[in-house]
């Protein structure tokens, strides 16, 4: 599996977004830098479902593969992480892959 190394799990993306919004609300962040941070946080929040979908896909593929005879099994391969590659590794590991 291959994808962006910048894609975050939903919990991390939500925490990042909430942090930036709180800084804005407290008046501790303004101007171009703050706008850029908010845009990045919003983008990360929008892409987080892809992280979760990849994790679930790798989980289901690994679970299915482990039900096959050993010589017919498939491998989940990724570049290691972070981001989508990490999601694939996590899903495969959570399903019992090694």
Image: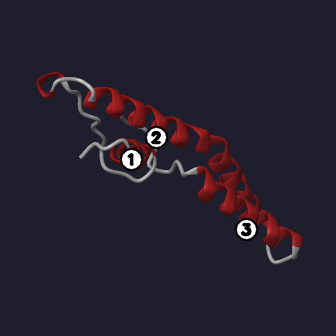
The residue lying toward the viewer, choosing from 37 and 47, is 47
Q: Is residue 30 visible?
A: no
User: In front: mark 1 or mark 2?
Assistant: 1
Residue corresponding to mark 3:
19
Residue corresponding to mark 2:
55
User: In front: mark 1 or mark 3?
Assistant: 1
* Res 13 → quadrant: bottom right
First along the sequence among labels 2 and 3: 3
Q: Tags 1 and 2 in contact by the CB under 8 Å rule?
A: yes
Q: CA distance from mark 1 to mark 3?
A: 29 Å
Quadrant in which the N terminus is drawn: top left
Q: CA distance from mark 2 to mark 3?
A: 25 Å
**Residue under the image location 33 percent in, 47 percent down:** 93
* 15 lies above or below 66: below
Residue 61 location, x and y as percent? 36, 29
Residue corresponding to mark 1:
94
Q: Residues within 10 Å of mark 1 (few under 14, many from 20)?
A: some
């Amino acid at each position: 599996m291959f994808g962006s190394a910048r894609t975050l799990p939903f919990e991390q993306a939500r925490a990042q977004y909430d942090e930036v919004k709180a800084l804005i609300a407290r008046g501790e962040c303004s101007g171009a830098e703050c706008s850029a941070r908010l845009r990045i946080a919003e983008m990360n929040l929008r892409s987080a479902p892809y992280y979760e979908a990849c994790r679930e896909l790798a989980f289901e593929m690994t679970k299915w593969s482990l039900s096959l005879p050993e010589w017919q099994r498939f491998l989940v391969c990724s570049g290691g992480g972070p981001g989508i590659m990490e999601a694939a590794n996590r899903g495969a590991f959570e399903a019992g892959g090694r």
